Image (cartoon, rainbow, N blue to C red):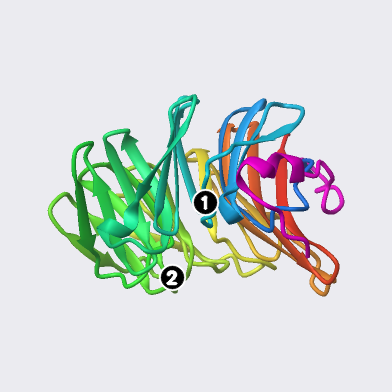
């Protein structure tokens, strides 16, 4: 595996070559990067404006034709992105928070706040940021000061919310909820795992734990979808509406919820000489959904980008 110098030199290392074959069906592979080991998350403003983040401080933007690297000055494994506009983009990873104002990137040291391994980011506004840490803590910024909170969950891999008094986390050892005054562990009825949480409304929240199972909160009770026919797992979630939710994971698994039930629409054949891991999914509409991840194999290790166009 080749290693690429990041930062200002990253642009020269972006190979616009597909790392593997077509995604098939409505999912097709977009030209990706052979020199970025892993892509971990993304934000989609539209079909011609997609931002991805990944290993060694990599941030790149797709304009509908080609990719261009952003010189963030970071060498951190970037794991999460949240954006309000092209001049208000937030990226997190390790002990670092990056902000793009449309012209330059500014870095904030999260280590000073006790954060060492940031895993996810959710934001209600630029003055209401929530960062999940792998050790189970959550860091909140109100625009002026930081507040580090301990949750009953001893790890966090995903975070989602609707307001400052309605925030969820998911991690290896369970699911937690913040009601504005305290964090409580909840029991959705599925095993814990490095999964994710996403919702269309406070009474429509999905949780996955890196398995074929998914749990849905309707505001009062949990309902579990077993999905025993799945070959793969769901580790990351995103949807455009309550009846249009996507789950992605290993091995190259893509699943869809249409309002009636979950169906696995794609997965990698078991026994292939490589392993696909999808780590992020996001879209601008029901007809414009993207996912990112990594492909590991004997002769290639690189980031992946796939796009859904029905």
Task: In this rendered view, identify the residue nearer to me: 284 or 86.
Answer: 86
Q: Position of residue 38 (x, y in %)?
A: 65, 57
Question: Which of the numbered marks, if any, corresponds to residue 130?
Answer: none
Q: Which residue is mark 1?
A: 237
168 to 285, vertically: above or below: below
Q: Which residue is mark 2?
A: 190
Q: Position of residue 229 (x, y in %)?
A: 67, 67
Contact check, label 1 and label 2, Cβ < 8 Å: no
Quadrant where the image shows the C terminus: top right
Foreground disc of the pair 1, 2: 1
Task: In this rendered view, identify the residue nearer to me: 46 or 240.
Answer: 46
Q: Residue at position x 58%, y 38% from top?
A: 71
Q: Could you classify mark 2 by the number of other residues whose Cα lies within 10 Å: few (under 14), some (14-19), or many (20 or more)?
A: many
User: Is 56 situated left or right of 22 in this image?
Assistant: left
Q: Residue at position x 12%, y 53% from top?
A: 181
Q: Position of residue 61 (x, y in %)?
A: 63, 34
Q: Could you classify mark 1 by the number of other residues whose Cα lies within 10 Å: few (under 14), some (14-19), or many (20 or more)?
A: many
Element type at marker 1?
strand
- Residue interval drawn in magenta: 1-28
Q: Residue at position x 41%, y 63% from top?
A: 117
Rendering quarter of residue 151: bottom left
Q: Position of residue 254 (x, y in %)?
A: 66, 54
User: Which secondary structure is most common in the magenta stretch?
Assistant: loop
Q: Going from the N terminus, do you reach mark 1 or mark 2 first?
A: 2
85 to 299, vertically: above or below: above
Rendering quarter of residue 234: bottom right
Task: In this rendered view, identify the residue nearer to me: 226 or 76.
Answer: 76
Cα separation, mark 1 vs mark 2, equals: 15 Å
21 magenta-colored: yes
152 magenta-colored: no
Which residue of the protein is positioned furthest toward the left in this rendering? Answer: 181
Q: Is residue 206 visible?
A: no
């Amino acid at each position: 595996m080749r290693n690429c110098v990041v930062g200002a030199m990253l642009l020269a290392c972006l190979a616009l070559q597909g790392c593997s074959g077509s995604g098939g069906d409505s999912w097709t592979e977009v030209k990706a990067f052979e020199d970025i080991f892993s892509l971990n998350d993304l934000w989609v403003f539209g079909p011609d404006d997609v931002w991805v983040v990944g290993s060694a401080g990599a941030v790149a933007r797709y304009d509908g034709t080609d990719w261009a690297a952003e010189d963030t000055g970071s060498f951190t494994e970037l794991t999460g992105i949240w954006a309000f506009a092209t001049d208000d983009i937030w990226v997190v990873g390790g002990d670092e928070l990056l902000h793009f104002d449309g012209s330059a990137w500014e870095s904030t040291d999260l280590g000073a706040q006790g954060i060492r391994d940031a895993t996810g980011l959710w934001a209600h506004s630029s003055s209401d940021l929530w960062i999940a840490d792998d050790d189970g803590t959550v860091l909140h910024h109100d625009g002026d000061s930081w507040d580090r909170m301990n949750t009953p969950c001893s790890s966090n891999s995903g975070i989602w919310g609707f307001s400052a008094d309605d925030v969820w986390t998911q991690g290896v050892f369970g699911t937690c909820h913040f009601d504005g005054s305290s964090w409580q562990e909840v029991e959705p009825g599925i095993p814990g795992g490095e999964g994710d949480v996403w919702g269309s409304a406070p009474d429509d929240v999905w949780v996955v734990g890196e398995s074929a199972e998914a749990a849905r909160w309707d505001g009062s009770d949990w309902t579990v979808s077993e999905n025993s026919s799945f070959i793969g797992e769901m580790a990351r979630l995103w949807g455009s509406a309550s009846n249009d939710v996507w789950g992605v994971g290993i091995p190259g698994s893509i699943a869809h919820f249409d309002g009636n039930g979950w169906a696995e629409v794609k997965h990698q054949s078991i026994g292939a000489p490589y392993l696909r891991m999808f780590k992020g999914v996001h879209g601008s509409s029901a007809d414009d959904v993207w996912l990112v991840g990594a492909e590991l194999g004997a002769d290639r290790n690189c980031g992946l980008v796939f796009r859904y166009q029905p």
